[in-house]
Image: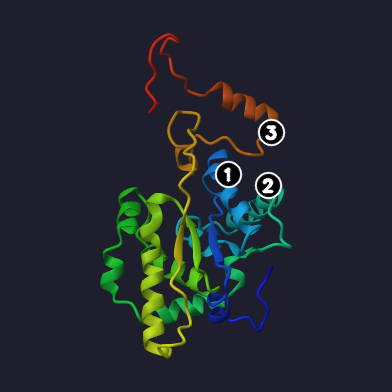
Amino acid sequence: MEATESTSPSALATAADPVVVSGIQPSGRLHLGNYFGAIRQHIDLHQEHEAFYFIVNYHAMTTVQDAEQLRQHTFDVALDYLALGFDPDEAALFVQSDVPAVTELMWIFFNLLPTSHLEKGVAYKEKVEAGLSPNAGLFNYPVLQAADILAYGGSLVPVGADQKQNLEMARDLARRFNHRFCPDDDPLFPLPEPHILDDVAVVPGTDGRKMSKSYDNPIGIFDEDETLKEKVMSIVTDSTPLDEPKDPET
């Protein structure tokens, strides 16, 4: 279900049914960790509520700056979602950059937010320490993320149990905007709530660590048979004898 031209964020916010909003990183073909970590929940939620899922190619530019690669990754993610059961008649699936109003809203939010709030960002510091370029896009990432959520009247955001703090920027900016520009009895933006994915499975990769492209250990959902066989055969297994107690953490 897609928003019509007459559908405003405030109308969505006051609807009885929550509006689900979530971004999808275009980092290449999806793997099993992606499916059990988020995609399965996305598919379930879009069948129950109004939902907006978008491929965040602007966010991806903080790390991927090859135009052709980014276009291909964006196409691949859309293709994979459709193949895994996403129904475009039930919810919206689109590319972040196709809606310029989101970046316009981001600019408004920039003028409402003290820079000190961004300087305290834990995620930014962790990414820079991990070796990512400390560019302005990465620094301002949370503001674009807030615009992504609030532009569609998002009131329910699927996140892992350890990502709840990621919504605080969106909630803070919604409060600031509503207080500055809206009557007390008619706020424009809802305060988005987290939909905690308590049953998210952490899928190990071929080396035993969490499955991730950054570890070069994923098993692709749509890998060719021969590639799949090679990856499965390379999986690190527990060498503990069968009759000895096992460590549940390994």
Nearer the observer: mark 2 or 3; the answer is: 2
Task: Identify the residue at horizontal 57%, vertical 72% (top origin).
Answer: 16
Residue that numbered label 3 is attached to = 224
Q: Disc 3 to disc 1, how far (Cα)?
A: 17 Å
Residue 31 seen: yes
Which badge, 3 or 1, is on the more N-terminal residue? Answer: 1
Residue that numbered label 1 is attached to = 35
Q: Are marks 2 and 1 in contact (CB under 8 Å)?
A: yes
The x and y percentages for residue 60 are: 50, 58
Q: Disc 2 to disc 1, how far (Cα)?
A: 9 Å
Nearer the observer: mark 3 or 1; the answer is: 1
Which badge, 2 or 3, is on the more N-terminal residue? Answer: 2
Q: Secondary structure at mark 3?
A: loop
Residue 73 seen: no
Q: Amino acid at mark 2?
A: Leu
Q: Amino acid at mark 3?
A: Glu
The x and y percentages for residue 195 are: 48, 57
Residues packed near mark 2 inside 10 Å, few (<14), some (14 to 19) or many (20 plus): few
Q: Secondary structure at mark 2?
A: loop
Q: Amino acid at mark 1?
A: Tyr
Residues packed near mark 1 inside 10 Å, few (<14), some (14 to 19) or many (20 plus): many
Q: Quadrant of the C terminus?
A: top left
**Residue 57 horizontal side relative to residue 106, left or right:** right
Q: Nearer the viewer, residue 48 or 180?
A: 48
**Residue 44 horizontal side relative to residue 37, left or right:** right
Check the image and name the residue furthest to the front. Answer: 16
Residue that numbered label 2 is attached to = 84
Task: Identify the residue at horizontal 68%, vertical 54% (top origin).
Answer: 86
